[in-house]
Amino acid sequence: MQIFGVDIGGSGIKGAPVDLDRGDLAQERHKVLTPQPATPDGVAGCVVEVVRHFDWDGPVGVTFPGVVTGGVTRTAANMDKAWVGVDTADLISARLDGRPVTVLNDADAAGIAEMTYGAGKGRDGTVILLTLGTGIGSALFRDGLLVPNTELGHLELKGHDAETRASVKAKEDHGLTWERWAHRVQRYLEHVEMLFSPDLFIIGGGVSRKPEKFLPLIEGVRAEIVPAKLQNNAGIVGAAMAAKGSTRGRGQGQSQSQGLDPGQSQSQSQSQG
């Protein structure tokens, strides 16, 4: 079975049909740059461009880098502030001629994909996925159930949002070597571990393609640390999982509540926010 997934990021918007039997992309993904400023209208136009690149005519799952409840975006740390309060599911559904659209937090999407098909498959206990990119996204699981919209990238670290110190963007902006950046990531992981005592950290985002560059440099963290197996495609796969079975039309977009078993990819419910 194939469903379309789109992953909206601070720097790029990418999508593809997803084979949900395999948990992998059915075709090579198409990516466009996130418009600057990243306004609702501009980003929605890019989502439409990505979907129409494949002549897709069916349900679409979309991730967003911020808190999403009931299809509405509540925060937009790395996007234009005009996103706050927008019914994103309805907006994109209308631009896609009424196709059913499901919207959820980007890290939550990556998390349910990794817990179903990737590095978290079969793992109980407390698992935290962290996506390191323009910011830091997080997905928190306990015995396979996700607590949605945790936004642990905004924990305070040395008086600043953690993502301003330990994201990939921070590495690039500050010209950090892998060693110096790994030390910052280590300090961040130690802080998260102190708060949640996870059994497993999964590191996602584009940097998961280069785990040998930084993971061996991280010391003093008790939890196991592994790279995401689906790497930077996890968000697309998770978005498609959330959209599976959607039958809503124009103006009827929805978001997936993540208090579910991620292995049941067909499950959908209204967010409780």
Image (tube, rainbow, N blue to C red):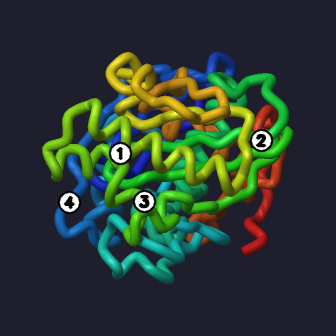
Label 4 element class: loop
Give the residue type at disc 1.
Answer: Gly
Give the residue type at disc 4.
Answer: Pro
CA gap between label 1 and label 4 equals 17 Å
Q: Nearer the viewer, mark 2 or mark 1?
A: 2
For residue 126, which numbered disc appears in the image? Answer: 2
For the residues labelled 2 and 3, say whether their Cβ atoms are less than 8 Å apart: no
Marks 2 and 4, the one that precedes in the sequence: 4
Q: Which residue is mark 4?
A: 35
Q: Which residue is mark 3?
A: 162
Give the residue type at disc 3.
Answer: Ala
For residue 133, which numbered disc appears in the image? Answer: 1
Q: Is residue 106 left or right of residue 178?
A: right
Residue 80 placement (x, y as % from top left): 30, 74
Residue 54, by quadrant, is top left
Q: Is residue 20 left or right of residue 67?
A: right
CA gap between label 2 and label 3 equals 21 Å
Marks 2 and 3, the one that precedes in the sequence: 2
Marks 1 and 4, the one that precedes in the sequence: 4
Give the residue type at disc 2.
Answer: Thr
CA gap between label 2 and label 1 equals 23 Å
Q: Is residue 155 above or below residue 30?
A: below
Quadrant position of the C terminus in the picture: bottom right
Identify the residue at horizontal 66%, vertical 46% (top origin): 242
For residue 153, which numbered disc appears in the image? Answer: none
Q: Residues within 10 Å of mark 4 (few under 14, many from 20)?
A: some
